[in-house]
Amino acid sequence: MDKKAQGLPINVIIVAAIALIVLVVLVAIFTGRLGLFGQEVSKVGQECTEFTTTIDNTEYNAEWQESPCGENEREIFTATDANEYPGEHCCIRK
């Protein structure tokens, strides 16, 4: 008898890989690892004054302001979703 071996179709392999990725994401969500990522992201935009620039041997710190940055300023970021300074702009001299 001449029997041919039966292989695994490529579709099954692709579906299994996608299912594995979904499983890893679900495990990350339920173990709290994704929550740690969210906490770190929420800290962005709360420490504007850490940014500095030096112009003509004078050091300037970035500052929060409610209005958009002016003509001689450059926006570093906007705290749209931050816990502190919501909607304000972090601007520094340029």
Image: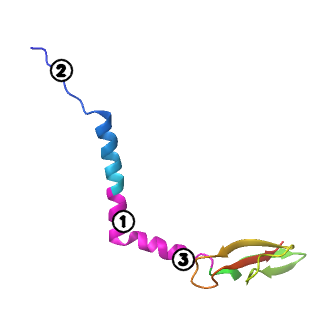
Q: Which residue is rendered at x = 60% and y = 85% of the image? A: 84
Residues at marks 3 and 1 touching, judged by CB atoms closer than 8 Å = no
Name the spot of residue 22 as percent of width and height, x first. 35, 56
Residue that carries the numbered disc 2 in the rendered image? 4
Q: Secondary structure at mark 2?
A: loop
In the image, taking residue 13 as reference, residue 47 lies left or right, namely right
**Of callouts 1 and 2, the N-terminal one:** 2
Residue at numbered disc 1: 28
Q: Which mark is residue 42?
A: 3
Secondary structure under badge 3? helix
Crowding around mark 3 (Cα neighbors within 10 Å: few <14, some 14 to 19, many 20+) is some
Identify the magenta region: 23-45
Amino acid under label 2? Answer: Lys
Q: Nearer the viewer, residue 60 or 7?
A: 7
Q: Disc 3 and disc 1: Cα gap in Å?
A: 18 Å
Residue 44 painted magenta: yes
Q: Residue furthest left?
A: 1
Q: How is the image coloured?
A: rainbow
- Whichever of labels 3 and 1 marks the residue nearer the N terminus, that label is 1
Quarter of the figure with residue 89: bottom right
> Marks 1 and 2, how far apart in space?
42 Å
Q: Identify which residue, 83 or 48, lies in the foreground.
A: 83
| Front-lying residue, 23 or 54 | 23
In the figure, is residue 48 to the left or right of 12?
right
**Residue drawn 28% across and 39% down?**
12
The answer to whether 43 appears left or right of 36 in the picture is right
Mark with earlier residue (3, 2)? 2
Do the residues under discs 3 and 2 have CB atoms within 8 angstroms? no
